[in-house]
Each structure stands twice: as structure tokens, then as C-alpha cells.
Amino acid sequence: MAKVCEICGKKPMFGNNVSHANNRTRRRFNPNLQKVRAIVNGKTRRITVCTRCIQAGKVVKAVR
């Protein structure tokens, strides 16, 4: 599963772990993705969405 928000397209970002000795190794910052039952084109579908999109109201949640 790709770690990508289906609404905004947010993906992992890359940076460095920095130790006290200033050694640098690559790391990745993953977006906070949640699986949500949402209404897409009039039908209920399970989509992977970042929490920013959920909080901003860009996702219409489906009621069971």
C-alpha cells in the first residue's frame, strides 16, 4: 500500500536523523493516514486519507 492520501496526495517526506556526534542518516516522515469509510461519487468506499483532510471536512464520512 502506498502511503499517499487519496484526497490531497500527501506523501512521505525525507530528512535526516542527526546524532549527538552530528552523524546523518536518511529517514522518512510518513503522513498520518487513516482508513475511512467515505461517500465517493454517491457510493460508500473505504479510502486512505490524511488526518488533515478529515479535520478540514474534505471527507464526507459514511454512516453505517
Image: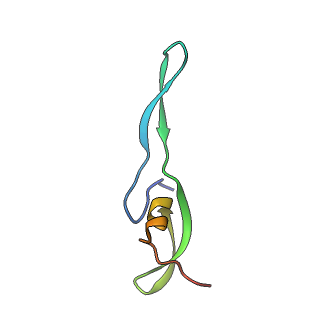
Instruction: Tell me the residue at 47%/85% (across/down).
Output: 43
Instruction: Tell me the residue at 43%/33% (across/down).
Output: 15
Residue at the far front in the pictured view: 56
Q: Position of residue 46 (x, y in %)?
A: 53, 73
Residue at the far right in the pictured view: 64
Residue 16 to residue 54: above or below: above
Instruction: Tell me the residue at 48%/51% (across/down).
Output: 31
Q: Position of residue 35 (x, y in %)?
A: 56, 65
Residue 58 to residue 29: above or below: below
Q: Position of residue 1 (x, y in %)?
A: 51, 56
Work out whether residue 60 or residue 3 is closer to the camera in this orientation and state it.
60
Residue at the far top in the pictured view: 21
Residue 22 to residue 27: above or below: above
Whether residue 11 sits left or right of residue 44 in the image: it is left
Q: Which color scheme did the rendering employ for the protein?
A: rainbow
Q: For residue 41, what is the image quadrant? A: bottom left
Q: Position of residue 23 (x, y in %)?
A: 49, 16
Instruction: Tell me the residue at 62%/85% (across/down).
Output: 64
**Total count of labels:** 0
Residue at the far bottom in the pictured view: 42
Work out whether residue 55 or residue 8 is closer to the camera in this orientation and state it.
55
